[in-house]
Image (spheres, helix red, strand yellow):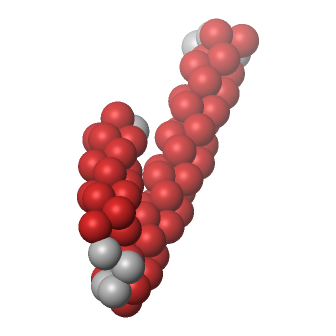
Amino acid sequence: MLAGHILLKILVSFIFAMVSTSFDTWFLNLFSVSIIFVIIILEIGIACLQAYVFTVLSIVYLKDIIHMH
C-alpha cells in the first residue's frame, strides 16, 4: 500500500510540473491523468482483497477457538 501511495505522489508531482511548464501537451497530460486513475483503481482493488483476506483469516481463527478439536 505504501508503494502505491508513493507512486501516486510521484506521478502527481510530475503532472503538476508538466502542467505548470506548458499547456500545449494536453494529450500527454490526459494520458498521465488516466494512468493515475488506473493506479487508484488498482489500489482500491488491493485494499478490498486485503480486507477480504483479513476477514476470512479472522473468521477461521475464531471458528478454531470456538470449536476446539
> Can you say whether 50 is above or below 42 in the image?
above
Regarding residue 45, the answer to whether it shows in the image is yes
Q: What residue lies at 63% left-to-right and 33% top-to-bottom?
A: 55
Looking at the image, which residue is at 35% across and 45% down?
9
* Residue in front for this viewpoint, 55 or 24: 24
Whole-percent x, y for residue 62 in the image:
66, 17
Does residue 54 appear to the left or right of 13 in the view shown? right
- State the quadrant of the C terminus: top right
User: In which quarter of the view is residue 29 placed?
Assistant: bottom left
Q: For the point 31% across and 75% down, which residue is it?
A: 22
Where residue 28 sits in the image (x, y, percent)? 32, 83
The image quadrant of residue 33 is bottom left
The quadrant of the picture occupied by the N terminus is: top left
**How many numbered circles are shown?**
0
Q: Furthest residue to the right?
A: 66
Question: Taking 14 as reference, is 68 left or right?
Answer: right
